[in-house]
């Protein structure tokens, strides 16, 4: 579904991504792991179009999307939940959700979509008309994911969803991701510093170090590979 | 008591115009986080265009329509050509650019229309209402001004609260990068914001033109009072701009009536200082929390 | 360096290393020489413009410290110039003190006003501060129009100032304008010297920290409110000095000399030159003083109709502002530095 070939991204003189090749299969959860500064966030930002690539191509469902603007990429079917969640604090929960669905359509289908999201993430029901800034960290993460899902994506990009959240909340979110993959066939690309959490739910995992891909294998293989775990995942 | 009533009503009518200009400034601030010093210049140009319509024999209403439409166009053009280059730069660059635009517009207006103040017709009668046997200083035209501004405020609030366009504009203003990830064409929203603001300003210009006459510098003081109204109300708050404008209009009317019209500027300063000392973000403004 | 040599004297008083102070002194000496050479090669009208540039630069330098260094936008420094101007006019009219004393006193008075304004505005940020200072710019000069103070302050006509003639030691025919340019130039160099020492001192560092991130600065021990108020006071003192010189050079302190556009021109000068850059304040002052005059000359000499040529300066001014800011977002000083570095890199 997603093919990345030779992707190179530079910030001035720094190579944030260096000739990265990757393939993400439809209906799978792929984890992108690595230490701080490995290039994981840059990878997602390049996929969603926030950042331009210096070299390489990105193909999504056999269409080249390198260099497309974020507003178009989301309409192509890729939704990005950014680092820090990106919940718009001044808007209510419902408005955040409605906003997520605007690129698809207005009116009735939006209402149905919101109802689906609220069912998927029950804590959002109670907070529906509250401003997003009143939400806890876990609720914000749920809102961010729900909002991304409103655009009916085929591919969901998640940047460090577990950051700053309590273990129980993380477990809930992981369970929901698994459910989305199993029931809806959603493809998920999951960036995480918390390798253990990611590997527990992912089908495949890719490890980045200083912008280069150093490992690309089934999740259970990487979880069992001591060398990789010690060198790059701090496990 | 009689004078008080007159001053109050006059203050409300003037305040409604300050409110409208404050509203335009708030719109632009909310949309693009820029204070538009050229607002007075832009509405001066649109009012001149309206003037050419009436002086050629067109009706007041046609001139009003021309002013509003040209405001929409002017606002969009200014945002795309003049403001776009400085949108992501330090805020003072935008201050200088809008100041430069103001000066440019005044120069162009002086060249094209000349410096002599031109008179502009009011929409309705300018003889005060007669209430209980006394003729008030409040005229049918004043009432029209107040009602129009209130209607515009309600209309804009409705657009922002309840329409998809309003939601997109708010998201583009609050969180442009996130908005892009959700499919909002942020640049387009900025342009729409400026166009709307300029249209509101154009309306304000036509409303106040009968009092100030029309000349390149006629609207300078009005702009400052409009800016004061926006700041007093809180730059993020459209209803704040209206409350700020009306209150400012009242206070300035009293100052002018009881202390003399020379120190009206000082009156505006005192109002602003008092409000900001108690509420540093304006009456209805929210302190911008840091995004962590 | 052998053991018998004494190490270079280090000033342990105050927070400035000796070498910076010496550097500033050298630049000041250079500035004085340049100003002298320039002033003697100009005619009387140009010397007058030189004086205008100098007092505008003094006010702009103060503003660039306030807005560039401590990050507080002020649209109202024209009002501080008015305070300085009126103080100078009143002192010169009622007292027989020498000009230097009068100017220092005017600057001091304006500094106190700046303290008050800074304290009142201490909680304001960004556009709210801009709004408050804008109202100050519009409102304070109208105090002179207040009928209760009309006798002391001269109302709309203002107060006249008798110009100090040049000292006889310079010769009977020494032009007044050159004398004015010298005095203003001297004040400019002194002001820049003092400001540059302030900028490189610990106080200057505190201001920069404040501009970067207020919370972090507070956590690092910077006394936020105190530093902010001090910055206001310093910029007010500079504007007051500039205003005092304005009144002295133009022989008049009147409300009409301090419209809103004056404050905006000061800000323009500071931003064009580069916020926080003292050299930039000088370039900016040159532009905002000369550009309108130059474009008026251009328009007049082209024999265009009145309404056209009267407005050409405005159009040119507006266009130049836009072009400079878009081409040099960091101001001219930053632009020159970039060009200089680019040149040096290409010749390596």
Image: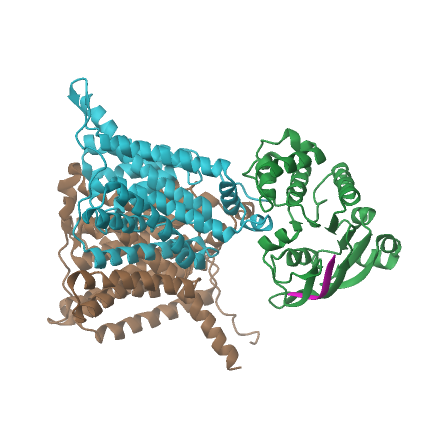
Chain colours: A green, B cyan, C brown
Residue B285 visible in the displayed image = no
- Image-based side of C304 in relation to C242, left or right: left
The range drawn in magenta is A1-9
Q: Quadrant of residue C247?
A: bottom left
Residue B94 vs residue B165, the one in the foreground? B165
- Image-based side of A107 in relation to C268, left or right: right
- The outermost residue toward the top is B132
Q: Residue at x 27, y 32 (%)?
A: B144
Give x and y (percent) for residue A67. 61, 62
- Image-based side of A120 in relation to C168, left or right: right
Residue A7 part of the magenta segment: yes
Residue B19 visible in the displayed image = yes
Q: Quadrant of the N terminus of chain C?
A: bottom right
Residue B253 part of the magenta segment: no
Residue C237 vs residue A226, the one in the foreground? A226
Residue A117 vs residue A9, the one in the foreground? A117
Q: Residue at x 16, y 30 (%)?
A: B127
Give x and y (percent) for residue B41. 30, 51
- The outermost residue toward the bottom is C347
Q: Quadrant of residue A121?
A: top right
Q: Is residue C294 above or below residue B34?
A: below
């Amino acid at each position: 579904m997603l093919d990345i070939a030779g992707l190179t991204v530079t910030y001035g003189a720094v190579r944030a991504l260096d000739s990265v090749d990757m393939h993400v299969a439809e209906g799978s959860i792929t984890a992108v792991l690595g230490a701080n500064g490995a290039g994981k966030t840059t990878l997602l930002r390049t996929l969603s179009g926030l950042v331009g690539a210096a070299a390489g191509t990105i193909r999504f469902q056999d269409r080249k999307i390198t260099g497309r603007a974020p507003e178009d990429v989301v309409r192509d079917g890729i939704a990005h939940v950014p680092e820090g969640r990106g919940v718009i604090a001044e808007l209510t929960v419902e408005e955040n959700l409605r906003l997520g669905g605007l690129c698809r359509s207005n009116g009735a289908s939006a209402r149905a979509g919101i109802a689906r999201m609220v069912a998927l993430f029950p804590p959002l029901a109670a907070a529906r008309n509250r401003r997003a800034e009143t939400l806890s960290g876990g609720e914000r993460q749920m809102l961010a994911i729900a909002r991304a899902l409103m655009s009916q994506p085929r591919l969901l990009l998640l940047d460090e969803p577990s950051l700053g959240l309590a273990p129980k909340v993380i477990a809930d979110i992981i369970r929901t991701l698994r459910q989305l993959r199993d029931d809806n066939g959603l493809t998920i690309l999951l960036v995480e510093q918390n390798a253990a959490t990611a590997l527990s739910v992912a089908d495949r995992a890719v490890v980045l170090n200083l912008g280069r891909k150093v490992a690309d294998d089934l999740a259970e293989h990487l979880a069992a590979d001591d060398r990789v775990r010690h060198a790059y995942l701090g496990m | 008591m009689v004078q008080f009533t007159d001053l109050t009503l006059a203050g409300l009518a003037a305040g409604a115009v300050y409110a409208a200009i404050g509203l335009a400034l708030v719109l632009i601030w909310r949309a693009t986080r820029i204070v538009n010093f050229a607002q007075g210049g832009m509405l001066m140009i649109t009012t001149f265009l309206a003037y050419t319509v009436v002086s050629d024999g067109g009706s007041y209403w046609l001139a009003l329509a021309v002013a509003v439409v040209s405001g929409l166009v002017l606002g969009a053009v200014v945002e795309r050509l003049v403001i776009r280059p400085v949108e992501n730069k330090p805020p003072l660059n935008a201050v200088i650019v809008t100041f430069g635009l103001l000066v440019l517009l005044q120069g162009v207006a002086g060249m094209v229309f000349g410096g002599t103040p031109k008179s502009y017709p009011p929409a309705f009668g300018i003889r005060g209402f007669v209430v209980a046997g006394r003729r008030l200083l409040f005229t049918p035209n004043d009432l029209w001004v107040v009602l129009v501004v209130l209607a515009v405020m309600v209309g804009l609030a409705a657009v922002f609260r309840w329409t998809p366009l309003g939601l997109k504009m708010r998201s583009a203003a609050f969180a442009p990068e996130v908005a892009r990830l959700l499919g909002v064409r942020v640049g387009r929203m900025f342009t729409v914001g400026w166009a709307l603001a300029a249209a509101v300003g154009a309306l304000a210009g036509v409303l106040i033109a009968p009092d100030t006459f029309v000349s390149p510098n006629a609207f300078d003081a009005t702009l400052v009072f409009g800016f004061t109204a926006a700041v007093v109300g809180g730059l993020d708050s459209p209803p704040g701009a209206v409350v700020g404008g009306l209150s400012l209009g009242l206070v300035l009317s009293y100052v002018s009536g009881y202390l003399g019209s020379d120190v009206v500027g000082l009156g505006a300063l005192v109002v602003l200082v008092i409000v900001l000392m108690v509420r540093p973000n304006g009456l209805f403004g929210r302190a911008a929390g840091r995004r962590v | 360096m052998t053991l018998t040599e004494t190490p270079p004297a280090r000033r342990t008083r105050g927070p400035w290393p000796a070498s910076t102070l010496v550097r500033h002194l050298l630049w000041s000496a250079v500035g004085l020489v340049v100003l002298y050479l320039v002033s003697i090669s100009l005619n009387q009208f140009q010397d007058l413009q030189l004086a205008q540039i100098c007092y505008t630069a003094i006010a702009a330098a103060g503003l660039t410290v306030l807005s560039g260094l401590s990050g507080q936008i002020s649209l109202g420094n024209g009002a501080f110039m008015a305070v300085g101007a009126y103080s100078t006019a009143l002192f010169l009219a009622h007292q027989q003190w020498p000009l230097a004393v009068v100017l220092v006193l005017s600057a001091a008075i304006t500094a106190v006003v700046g303290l008050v304004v800074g304290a009142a505005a201490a909680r304001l940020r960004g556009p709210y501060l801009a709004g408050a200072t804008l109202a100050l710019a519009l409102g304070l000069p109208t105090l002179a129009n207040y009928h209760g103070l009309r006798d002391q302050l001269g109302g709309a006509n203002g107060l006249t100032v008798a110009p100090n003639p040049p000292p006889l030691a310079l010769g009977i025919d020494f032009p007044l304008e050159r004398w004015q340019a010298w005095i203003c130039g001297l004040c400019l160099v002194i002001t820049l010297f003092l400001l540059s020492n302030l900028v490189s001192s610990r106080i200057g560092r505190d201001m920069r920290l404040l501009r970067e991130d207020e919370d972090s600065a507070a956590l690092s021990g910077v006394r936020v409110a105190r530093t902010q108020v001090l910055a206001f006071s310093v910029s007010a003192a500079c504007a007051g000095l500039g205003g005092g010189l304005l009144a002295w050079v133009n022989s008049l302190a009147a409300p009409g000399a301090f419209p809103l556009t004056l404050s905006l021109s000061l800000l323009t000068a500071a931003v064009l030159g580069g916020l926080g850059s003292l050299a930039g304040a000088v370039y900016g002052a040159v532009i905002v003083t000369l550009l309108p005059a130059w474009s008026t000359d251009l328009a007049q000499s082209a024999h265009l109709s009145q309404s056209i040529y009267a407005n050409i300066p405005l159009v040119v001014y507006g266009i130049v502002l836009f072009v400079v800011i878009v081409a040099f977002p960091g101001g001219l000083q930053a632009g020159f530095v970039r060009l200089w570095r680019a040149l040096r890199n290409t010749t390596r």
